[in-house]
């Protein structure tokens, strides 16, 4: 009888050890899963915001693309530093243009100011004001509401306008562009 009690006691201890090991393994697996999920979420939140193509196709790797990604943070830092010292401003009158849409009933009311690299550009800006307005109207009227309603879309619009306008200027270049009124209806 003493032997039977001893055998029962050993079986209970062995069962508790197995159950304790199983719980420990489950806890470790859950912690690993939490770490992996946390890592993925952190990566997605801290990623640069570059979107993959919407059609699901992969893009080929180009060395020039790496150069672009390396320059992007530098470009953003330069823009932030440039906001501390704003150059001479050139205000433009208000633009009201129809946006590209199926119904044709969406329009954009926009006012902007151009930041000049130097004050010597003012006479050229005055003489080319009709050309500048024409370029801006063409760019704005070619956009859909989806393209310009996000912050990223507005930044792309600014870059496109600056690029086009800098091509026609000879006395200097535009440093930045500021939207002072931006209403879509």
Image (cartoon, rainbow, N blue to C red):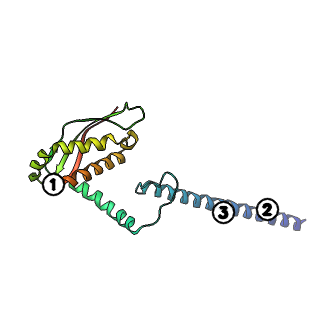
Q: Earlier in the sequence, mark 3 or mark 2?
A: 2
- Residue at the location (15% across, 46% down)? 128
Q: Viewed as shown, does residue 68 lie left or right of 114?
A: right
User: Disc 3 and disc 2: Cα gap in Å?
Assistant: 20 Å
Residue 99 to residue 54: above or below: above
Q: Earlier in the sequence, mark 3 or mark 1?
A: 3
Q: Residues within 10 Å of mark 2 (few under 14, many from 20)?
A: few
Mark 1 — residue? Answer: 117
Q: Earlier in the sequence, mark 2 or mark 1?
A: 2
- Residue at the location (25% across, 45% down)? 135
Front residue of 30 and 147: 147
- Residue at the location (81% across, 64% down)? 11
- Residue at the location (31% across, 47% down)? 157
Q: Residues within 10 Å of mark 1 (few under 14, many from 20)?
A: some
Q: Marks 3 and 2: CB-CB under 8 Å?
A: no
Determine whether the residue tagged by mark 3 lies in a helix, strand or loop.
helix
Residue 97 to residue 123: above or below: above
User: Disc 2 and disc 1: Cα gap in Å?
Assistant: 84 Å
Q: Residues within 10 Å of mark 3 (few under 14, many from 20)?
A: few
Q: What is the x, y in percent for residue 163?
A: 26, 53
Mark 2 — residue? Answer: 12
Mark 3 — residue? Answer: 25
Q: Viewed as shown, does residue 84 lie left or right of 47?
A: left
């Amino acid at each position: 009888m003493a032997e039977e009690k001893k055998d029962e006691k050993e079986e209970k201890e062995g069962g508790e050890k197995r159950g304790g090991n199983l719980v420990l393994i489950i806890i470790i697996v859950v912690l690993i899963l939490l770490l992996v999920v946390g890592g993925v979420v952190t990566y997605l939140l801290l990623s640069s915001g570059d979107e993959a193509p919407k059609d699901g196709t992969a893009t080929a790797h180009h060395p020039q693309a790496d150069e672009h990604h390396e320059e992007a943070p530098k470009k953003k830092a330069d823009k932030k530093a440039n906001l501390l010292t704003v150059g001479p401003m050139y205000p433009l009158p208000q633009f009201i243009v129809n946006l590209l849409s199926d119904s044709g009933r969406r329009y954009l009311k926009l006012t902007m100011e151009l930041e000049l690299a130097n004050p010597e550009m003012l006479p050229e800006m005055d003489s080319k004001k009709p050309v500048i307005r024409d370029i801006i109207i063409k760019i704005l009227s070619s956009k859909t509401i989806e393209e310009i309603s996000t912050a990223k879309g507005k930044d792309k619009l600014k870059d496109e306008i600056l690029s086009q306008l800098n091509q026609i200027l000879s006395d200097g270049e535009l440093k930045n562009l500021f939207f002072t009124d931006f209403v879509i209806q």
